[in-house]
Image (spheres, rainbow, N blue to C red):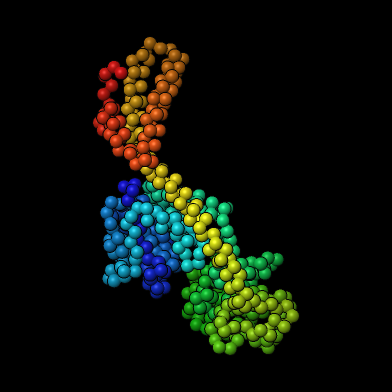
Amino acid sequence: MLQNFKAISLSYKKAPLDIRELIALDEISCRQYLQTLKGFIQASDILVLSTCNRTEVYYNSDADYSTEIVKLLGITKGIENISKYFDYFTILNEHDDAVQHLFEVSMGLESQVVGDMQITNQVKQAYQWAADNETAGPFLHRLMHTIFFTNKRVVQETAFRDGAASTSYAAIELIEDLTAEITEPAILVVGLGEIGADVCRNLKDKGFKNVKITNRTLSKAKILAEECEMEVLPFEEIVQGLKEADVIISSVAREMPFFTKEMIKRLNVLTYKFFIDLSVPRSVEAEVESIPGVLVYNIDIIQNKASEALQQRINSVPKVKEIILESIEQFNDWSKEMVVSPTINKLKNALESIRQEEMARYLKKLSPEETKRLDNITKSMMQKIIKLPVLQLKAACKRGEAETLIDVLNDLFDLENKSVDTSHTL
């Protein structure tokens, strides 16, 4: 079982956004799905990861359950005939491929934005749900902690997570810089296209609380506001919203600028207002910046900032892959040792049984002090006797030769039997 880790993945690489949205799992659905998988497939170490860019299931089993996993996903999501989406999934049935994939996903190598900083927390959350639902065994626990340690190394030893490498992240980073001296800055997001929605989600993740969103289509604003726990400002009240806001983020789609110099001039700006224009064509007229106290940052400024960070991350990819390789090698050594762990425990128990029975023969004749001394001496002897076989077993694991030694030890100590015959004199 230890060497049969598998994965099934639906991601942005093969599936368009509408398919990913249809199949994505929230926390309640994910927990329900984990319980369903636990009850219906013969697998251990089940992990379910679901984000806006991917929905993946990792599991440990001799059998290929990819078809059943997709069908059970359809039941959980209430999707009839989900099998028609099967071609959008990637199946990883080779142990090494599945382990490698989970490492690369967790580090952000497989993200749409290379080095995505959100993915680590999303993987940790998926692991927590697996632990809560008792679908994480020793193998998965060790694998996930190895991944988290690897992530720390990536952060400490590379520039892979430095800077904001997407437009929406770069916008948030700019807002943090601009509002560093403002307590609870008031932010107004105008226009909720894909980039505007991403900005709202990132504002929530970064802990901004005083955020209002407005959009010509009110229903769209309400749906996003509920998701991001933000306040909806009716579009007809936008002037009042502009007066109150410290930062205005605009992603309005139209041919001519929406925010004009005359419009902003009428606000009678008394404190700094920062306009972040994410629209193409621009939605904030260039002349707006001539108004005292108003500063405008357009998409080029933000994308240049993002591009520099992205290039820095791309340059770090070889080092990140090197760190991952080292971690996988260490993890594989542990995995191989797990194969011999039952034999080591049986050997320890067999020797301890012999020790206890031999001790029992003489305890009645000994004082408490002598009993304690004899117990310590025999324990020390057992530890020294077992040390070399254990080291040899672990070394044989790394060479792929453990089976022969396991057979020898089983024969020598009759380890397959429930009890070890200790009547013979050694």
Q: Nearer the viewer, residue 79 or 400?
A: 400
Q: Residue at x 57, y 84 (%)?
A: 281
Where in the figure is residue 45, as x and y percent of width and height?
36, 51
Q: Position of residue 208 (x, y in %)?
A: 59, 66
Residue depicted at x 45% and y 17%:
373
Q: Residue 55, percent across and down?
A: 39, 64
Q: Residue at image x 54%, y 51%?
A: 153
Residue name at image x 51 percent, y 56 percent: 320
- Percent position (x, y) of residue 247? 64, 74
Relative to residue 353, is residue 175 depicted above or below? Answer: below
229 lies above or below 38: below
Vertical placement of 413 versus 138: above or below?
above
Q: Quadrant of residue 167?
A: bottom right
Figure quadrant of the C terminus: top left
Can residue 288 be seen here? The reply is: yes
Name the side, left or right, on which 411 lies relative to 203. Answer: left
The reply to whether residue 190 is in sight is no
Q: Nearer the viewer, residue 315 or 282?
A: 315
The number of numbered badges drawn on the structure is: 0
Question: 57 or 398, which is in the foreground?
Answer: 398
With respect to residue 361, does 279 lie above or below?
A: below
Which residue of the protein is positioned furthest toward the top in this rendering? 365
Q: Is residue 89 left or right of residue 202?
A: left
